[in-house]
Image (cartoon, grey):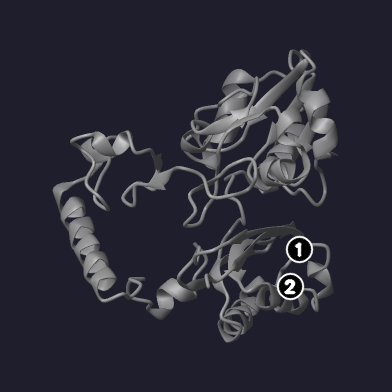
Amino acid sequence: MSEHFSVCALYKFVSLPDYRSLQQPLLEHCLSLNIKGTLLLAEEGINGTISGSAEEVQQLIDYLERDTRLCGIDYKFSEVNEKPFYRMKVKLKREIVTLGVEGIDPNKTVGQYVAPEHWNALISDPDVLVLDTRNDYEVEIGSFEGAVNPNTSSFREFPQYVADNCNPEKHRKVAMFCTGGIRCEKASSFMLEQGFEQVYHLQGGILNYLDSVPEEESLWRGDCFVFDNRVTVNHQLQEGQYDQCHACRRPITNEDKKSPHYIEGVSCDRCYAFSSDSRKARFAERQKQIALAKQRNEQHIGAPPPSRQCNKKVQ
């Protein structure tokens, strides 16, 4: 009988001036519940994805909501048959989603939320600029019909893209989306600060849309990248057909694996030329240890020193 794991993606922008003191108790509680995944804490709030049994996940939610500031966290759930994470980490960050621009606060200024059932009508309006705020490798495997790909390799590049390509006088209506809602929520706050007046974002992100809108009515095309061992999910929120290059973390297909530059766990066609020999050697050794663990019917999760589970310094 296969195991079932509940995956919970969560975030909330909320003032947490004492976020450093929350880290260790939160980590210890997650470990006591056998919860795995990663949670980020910053002065601006909490973000992350965790997994466990449905009961364990609910117990963690109950624990978080004992702090009244964390009531009303945005949660998204899905079910998987294999462990999506192998360890638990609670990290301290300057931002729970890194835009790199000071003073952007979704608690003070944020765009208009659009429910999934109203999203199709909005993005079908020819006067609306539809922006995918995710990274280029995420956009490549799936996006909304007609959406613009900013071709950014990280969210930090989004402000420069806006400066170079968007104009409040020309783009009177802007609609944005991301995987779970957090990036576009912060992006909407940024764009309002830049003078854009009508800024909209998909409430709950792509995952909420896929869960809410029937596939026959959907304007979503392709798979959605997720940040766990599933790599991607399809419109039914089931595990997609992509694997992942464990060197550069990009999604890859079976066709990609036919490249002479693809070496399992070491490189793919995208990263081979940019990876040093020492890096390839290190990844090759890691892959060797993974293979040995598999022969012993064990999971290889690497060394779990405290610094990897619970950072003491803000990065």
Residue that mark 2 sits on: 61
Three-letter amino acid code at the position of disc 2 = Ile
SS for callout 1: loop
Q: Position of residue 39 (x, y in %)?
A: 59, 66
Q: Residues within 10 Å of mark 2 (few under 14, many from 20)?
A: some
Q: Position of residue 113 (x, y in %)?
A: 83, 40
> From the viewer's perspective, is the residue at label 2 or at label 1 nearer?
2
Q: Is residue 304 left or right of residue 12?
A: left
Up-down relation of residue 106 to residue 91 (above or below)? above
Up-down relation of residue 227 to residue 184 (above or below)? below
What whole-number distance in Å separates the C-alpha atoms at marks 2 and 1?
18 Å
**For residue 12, what is the image quadrant?**
bottom right
Q: Position of residue 108 (x, y in %)?
A: 82, 49
Up-down relation of residue 155 to residue 38 (above or below)? above
Three-letter amino acid code at the position of disc 1 = Ser
Q: Position of residue 78 (x, y in %)?
A: 65, 57
State how many labels appear.
Answer: 2
Q: Is residue 28 left or right of residue 177?
A: left
Q: Residue at x 19, y 46 (%)?
A: 276
| Marker disc for residue 15 | 1
**For residue 38, what is the image quadrant?**
bottom right
| Marker disc for residue 305 | none
* Residue 140 shows in this picture: yes
**For residue 111, what is the image quadrant?**
top right
Instruction: Single out the residue that lies furthest toward the front.
Output: 1
Q: Tag 1 or tag 2, which sits nearer the N-term?
A: 1
Q: Is residue 252 left or right of residue 284?
A: right
Q: Residue at x 77, y 27 (%)?
A: 195
* Depth order, front residue of 192/81: 81
